Image (spheres, rainbow, N blue to C red):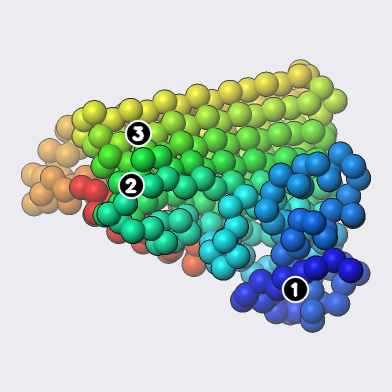
Amino acid sequence: MSKKVSITPPVHPELIEGSSGLDKKTSNYLLYETGNFIEKYPECEKELIQDFSHVLFIPENLVIKEIIFLQDILREYNVKNLLIILERSASVKIYNNTLQNFAKSLDPSINSGRTEGINFNLQENSKLDCYLFLAGEQEASFVETEFNLSVNLLGEHAHANVTGFYLAGKNQKINMQTSQKHLSQNSFSNLIINGVLAQESQVKYCGKIFVAKDAIGVKASQENKNILLGENIILDAAPELEVLNNEVECEHGCAAGQFDDKQLFYLQSRGFDKNQATLLLIEGFFGFINNLDYDIRIRESLLEKIKLKIRGIL
């Protein structure tokens, strides 16, 4: 029998649609520990699963309407590398706030780094909406923080939307890697990762889209935009495409810059000081969040955390 660990808070049965073959009252969503879970998968996937400390399994045809707040899982079970598997026609919304996840457990006086990895395997007709927020504590100065995200679209018509934000405070270093791997035809992925870098911060971002030779009809996009606040900032952004067939629609891009002095001058002429003017412009930079198809709790949570963090680094 597979060992299973229930995740709290549980998903209520009325929030679940579809027939998974499991008892909805007891299954909800379950975290399976690696050693007792891999018998379900072929040999090639067993090796992959063994690389992760925990596996979150969304069964076939299961539609979870409620948002899964991933930081609760990661914190409660001390998960370092997590593999999330969506079987055929499964659907889930994931929100991960790494500000709470790794920073809260650190003594702010200690310079220390953390590495975290989240990996998604999407089967046929499955759908993923993932929202990420990456930032350190106001008082902490991390030597280096690493975050790795991998989205593997394994089945036809698998669909993934990922929106993420990072805020690098003074003297903080963030090393982030994302991967969108299309191994099946007619799959879709869209990834937006935007960031704000404070004075003397460092960010390295590597984002890759891979499309297999037989994965025709793929649509994939990747966007990375950055606002630079102050001097002595190091930004190394490397978007990458590896496409092995010609029947796809793929795009990627990266941009970085500072706010226009004219914009700041205009706001200051209207009575705002420099920090207030900068905060307003940053809020405008992230304002597109309100236009995305987010649950209102996600929008409010993201915007509030962004405001609090920015006030701390200005």
Residue in view at x 47 percent, y 47 percent: 114
Q: Label 3 vs label 2: CA separation?
A: 15 Å
The residue identified by callout 3 is 202
Please provide percent x and percent y for residue 210: 69, 27
Q: Label 1 vs label 2: CA separation?
A: 39 Å
Please provide percent x and percent y for residue 257: 31, 29
Quadrant containing the N terminus is bottom right
Residue 303, quarter of picture: bottom left
The residue identified by callout 2 is 111
Q: Which mark is residue 299?
A: none
Q: Earlier in the sequence, mark 1 or mark 2?
A: 1
Residue in view at x 90 percent, y 42 percent: 43
Q: Secondary structure at mark 1?
A: loop
Residue 81 against residue 239 in the figure, above or below: below
Q: Which mark is residue 28?
A: 1
For discs 3 and 1, the disc positioned in front in the rendered view: 3
